[in-house]
Image (cartoon, grey):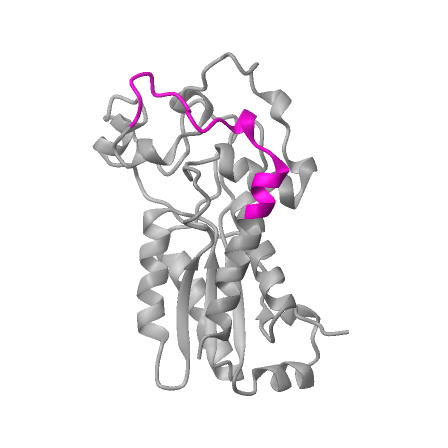
Amino acid sequence: MKINEFRLMTPREIKERAAAPSVALIPVGSMEWHGLHMNPGMDTMHAEKIAMLAAAETNAVVLPALYIGTEVRRTEQQLRNLGFDGTEDITGVDFPSNLIPSMYFPPRIFKDVIETEINYLKRVGFRKIIVLNGHGADKQIEILDELAGLCSDEKTKVINFLCFSPDDGYDLGHACLLETSIMMSIDQNAVDISTLPERSVPLKFREYGVYDGKAISGNPNRTYTVEFDPRDATKEIGQTHIQRTARRCIALIEDK
């Protein structure tokens, strides 16, 4: 039986899999507020699921998932797009109404950890390293893009892969319909829609810590309420997304 997880492999198995052509996958996400109805580890679990599916069909090796997402303070315009005054001091999705805070790592620490792991995998001998990112924060994407450029050389290619399929037809948002569906398909027990009010009650961004992607992009509706509602989520929507995204990752792994 083929072992795909780095943490379970013997040194000899690692060296054999690191022989060119070889690919290492680093799943990374966050430990972040995802509404009353969902677990904080969703982002990382999503990235890990994609990595494991892709590795099962290729020769890629999966590193232990990293729950070390980073975020920065929201800009005045971002806050206004979410229904705030614009003067609040809010980092990421740590809204004042949330029951618990998110566990964000400072950007410099996030960068150091990922860079250290990439450089280690280069020393082992991997020729392609793909960071599967399940956390869509601008700062996290910026850092991973920077590392892809800094750490790539004539021997090793480093790639930042955002774990969302662009052809789903759903607004991404945060902890809304798509992310909730994804989590349902990974672990149904990690989602509890009953913690949200009945379907007829609109979910205000600032009250529930969930919001549509179109809102943060500058096009919120007048009531600052969710349109792509997590209460409409289904396991089937999540499975379709995961399958499509895994296929995209497999194509990246197999690309010469």
Asked whether the viewer can see residue 34, the reply is no
The magenta span reads 220-240
- Please indicate whether residue 65 sits to the left or right of residue 77 in the image: right
Q: Residue at x 37, y 38 (%)?
A: 92
Quarter the N terminus occupies: bottom right
Q: Nearer the viewer, residue 232 or 90?
A: 232
Q: Position of residue 88 (x, y in %)?
A: 28, 27
Q: Residue at x 50, y 77 (%)?
A: 121
Quarter the C terminus occupies: bottom left
Q: Is 239 drawn above or below residue 147 in the view shown?
A: above
Q: Residue at x 46, y 76 (%)?
A: 128
Q: Residue at x 49, y 12 (%)?
A: 201
**Quarter residue 54 falls in:** bottom right
Q: Position of residue 9 (x, y in %)?
A: 69, 75
Q: Position of residue 52 (x, y in %)?
A: 62, 61
Q: Nearer the viewer, residue 226 or 110?
A: 226
Q: Position of residue 94 (x, y in %)?
A: 41, 33
Number of marks drawn? 0
Q: Is 24 drawn above or below residue 95 in the view shown?
A: below
Q: Is 38 drawn above or below residue 24 in the view shown?
A: above
Residue at the farthest right position? 1
**Quarter residue 8 falls in:** bottom right
In the image, residue 59 lies in the stretch drawn in magenta:
no
Q: Is 91 drawn above or below residue 115 in the view shown?
A: above
- Please indicate whether residue 38 sits to the left or right of residue 174 in the image: right
In the image, residue 228 lies in the stretch drawn in magenta:
yes
Asked whether the viewer can see residue 147, the reply is yes
- Please indicate whether residue 165 sits to the left or right of residue 243 in the image: left
